[in-house]
Image (cartoon, helix red, strand yellow):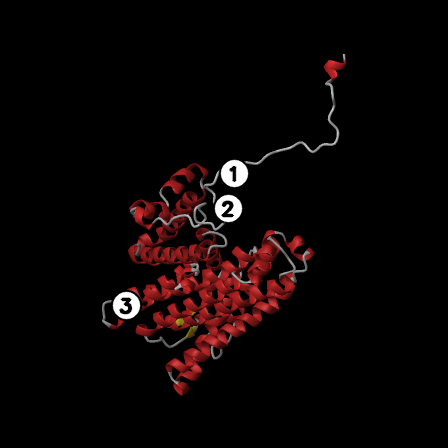
Amino acid sequence: MAGLKNIKWKKYVSYVVLAAATVILAVLSFAGALKSSDIYLLEKVAISIMLAVSLSMVVGFLGELSLGHAGFMCIGAYLGGKTAVLLEPVLGEFPTLFVALILGGIIAAVFGIVIGLPALRLRGDYLAIVTLAFGEIVRSVFMNSSDESFGGSLGLDTPRFDKEYLFIIALVLVLGCLVVTQNLIHSKHGRAITSIRDNEIAAKATGINVTKYKLIVFCVSSFFAGVAGVLYSYSNYTVQSANFDYNYSIEILVMVVLGGMGSINGSIIAAALITFLDVKLQTILTGNLAVLQDLFYALILILLVIYNNAPALRGFREKYNISKLFARFKKHNPATVKDDEAKWDRVPTKIKMDEVLSVDVQVTSPYTPDKSPKEEK
């Protein structure tokens, strides 16, 4: 029991909430209470959360601006789809998914290292331009591929995974992504990574291998982007390179920025919210009103960014935040207040603190003047 009290439960809130949500949604799915549209929404939410959390490692904790996250996702999507086409008739659905997830994640991580070696020596806008160019190159390569290899400009036709199980598998993989990310950030390596973000010159001066830690973060982030791409290929019937353009990379970056730089829980909430808005706007705005989707989407994002960052709304945010609202509903019970273990009547001492002590003070100075300066005058 003493060990349970010393656990910092705030670090594990996201684990508990996500695991509970996965169990509840799985039960509802098996009971037939979820619609096909709801299942598809949950798949997209899980993919977006994995992308946002993985990019948050680069942007939020490492402090580097990357605009090529959709490129790593594109690699995983095409390789996962091709693996499903080739191996599913032989191995079956579940073994093929397992092989595709590993293959797509590892190859995306390898490309992350290959691009990271020269690119991570750059900083700021230069790194953003290089990663953006990488994403566009990857997209162009798959777009200009032959129809027999990756489908060319029409895209790659992929088999659809069972809807009842795919979103559950995706949520479990998101939980694994959270475990890896938080354990890395809260370790000594995570402290080295955040020190690079705060001051790279000071980090180098203290002996931190900056290039090594940048490659580690870029590799892990690329791996989970590739895994998200594999899930995307199994969630859709066709993988088209046009869906992985720079706009999608910016959308993932918006999720990270909106949730708060360096906040994993914030990235999760922002990814789920933006994906929900995107899907619902696609459903509501149909026909001629479809042109208004981007307008409403951008307007909602602008309002959310203003609310989170406007100095004029700071007092409102502090007064009506979630923790303050929960504190109002929580009743104060005086019986739960513990006594101070360091009170004077509890601390064992050699002398009782309620005793009155007297000390005789004597002057021990060897020189005592007989007369004051006034008496001499």
Other-residue count near label 3 (Cα within 10 Å), few / some / many at <14 / 14–19 / ≥20: few
Other-residue count near label 1 (Cα within 10 Å), few / some / many at <14 / 14–19 / ≥20: few
Give me the disc on residue 36: 3
Q: Who is closer to the viewer here, 168 or 357?
A: 357
- Judge whether 173 appears above or below 9 on screen: below
Mark in front: 3 vs 2 = 2
Mark in front: 3 vs 1 = 1
Please, what is the three-letter code of the amino acid marked with disc 3?
A: Ser
- Judge whether 324 appears above or below 173 on screen: above
Percent x, y for residue 263?
47, 55
- Tell me whether the residue at label 1 lies in contact with that at label 2, contact meaning CB atoms closer than 8 angstroms: yes
Please, what is the three-letter code of the amino acid marked with disc 1?
A: Leu
Percent x, y for residue 333?
30, 47
Residue at 41%, 48% in the rendered image? 340
- Judge whether 60 appears above or below 84 on screen: above
Q: For numbered disc 3, what is the local secondary structure?
A: helix
Mark sitting earlier along the chain (3/2): 3
Residue that numbered label 2 is attached to = 351
Q: Who is closer to the viewer here, 305 or 241?
A: 305
Give me the disc on residue 357: 1
